[in-house]
Amino acid sequence: MSASFFSAAYGEARQRFLEAAAKAGAAVQHHVHPLKGAAGEEIGTDTALIGPGDVARLFIVTSGTHGPEGFSGSACQLALLNDELAKRAADRGIALLLIHAVNPYGFSHLKRTNEDNIDLNRNFGDFSQPYPDNPVYEQIHDLLVPATWPPSADNEERLTASMTRLAGQRDPGVSSGQAKHADGLFYSGTAPAWSNRTIRSILRSHGTNKRHIAWIDVHTGLGPYGHGEKIFGRHSAETTKRAKAWWGGDLIVSTATESVSPRTIGHITGCAPEECPGAAITPTTLEYGTVPNPVVRHALRGEAWLAGHPDAPAPLVKDIRRAVRDAFFVDADDWKGMILGQFRAQALQTINGLANEQI
């Protein structure tokens, strides 16, 4: 049953999301992207709001911040639209806002990054200030993005040795973000991307009159197979206490050594306090493991190389895109069941936590 909520392509995922939203009686809005999808289709970030807009509590679920990670996030949203939890939230004075495909271009084209090779989870920072230097990334950029693809055996050996040497470096780490290499991995960009501007507009539209906002951003690609780590950023003691009360002792602060995620600058949920300053914001990233880290890293290297070689042969392009898809989506029923089961549990925790907050 759980496998049925997963789609095979962005276009299918979008259609099913919109159909389920309409069936659930949600208020739907479309934010059409200026570019086209991989099949020439219209792409966009769509929202579905269930429940009255004038309540004080809002529960946000986002999918596809990192392109093909949207296969799982979209499935979680589709399952929620077909679940009695959505009605339970409305009955308890909570509006449910599902934001489908934050990065529709990456979702459709099977790119973790957006149309400009920007990692959107490094793009939500303050561009009036320089993006922090990342000397760790600088040491290995030329190894990560070689001149030719597939990389040579010598390149692979040198990269493996460098990654071993840098193991445990987290503040910053290789994947913490960087602004110097537009053709590189984890690139922040130099200005707010289309998706950044769109998400901020959505938050202003739906969140400025809220007192409490909970936000789950669904991701894949880090950690053990099928395990969903509840990652919590660097927040105040009050917010941390509230998050742990809602989501339990397995909530992991991203700065902790046991977290699968490094420190990052420009995370998507970080814009919520800026756009909704009157609300208490309780955000988390739900990060599901897929395949071993070296496999994920290889896929991302291929994606970065391809961004700088748009005229690559079609068979090679297809191989790289498929590798990215497979790094962030496991087409296996047991994995899909783990994704939806853990998401539903956290969604229920979130609804209960929000409902019990004093207004």
Image (tube, helix red, strand yellow):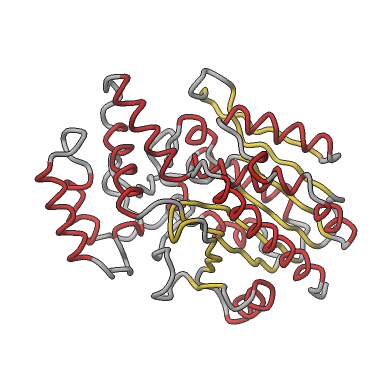
- Give the residue at the far right of this rendering: 91
Looking at the picture, does residue 287 appear above or below residue 7?
A: below
Residue at the spot 40% in from the left edge and 51% down from the top edge: 291
Q: Which image quadrant for residue 92?
A: bottom right
Residue at the spot 43% in from the left edge and 53% down from the top edge: 122
Q: From the viewer's perspective, tell me whether residue 284 is left or right of residue 54.
A: left
Residue at the spot 84% in from the left edge and 35% down from the top edge: 23
- x, y percentage for residue 14? 65, 32
Q: From the viewer's perspective, tell me whether residue 319 is left or right of residue 140.
A: right
Q: From the viewer's perspective, tell me whether residue 253 is left or right of residue 119.
A: right
Frontmost residue, 328 versus 355: 328
- x, y percentage for residue 231? 52, 66
Q: How many marks?
A: 0
* Quadrant (top left/top right/bottom left/bottom right) for the N terminus: top right
Looking at the picture, does residue 212 appear above or below residue 266?
A: below
* Quadrant (top left/top right/bottom left/bottom right) for the C terminus: bottom right
Q: From the viewer's perspective, tell me whether residue 223 is left or right of residue 338.
A: left
Residue at the spot 21% in from the left edge and 65% down from the top edge: 166
Looking at the picture, does residue 268 appear above or below residue 166?
A: above
Q: Which image quadrant for residue 255?
A: bottom left
- x, y percentage for residue 337? 62, 51
- x, y percentage for residue 49? 78, 45
Frontmost residue, 356 versus 124: 356
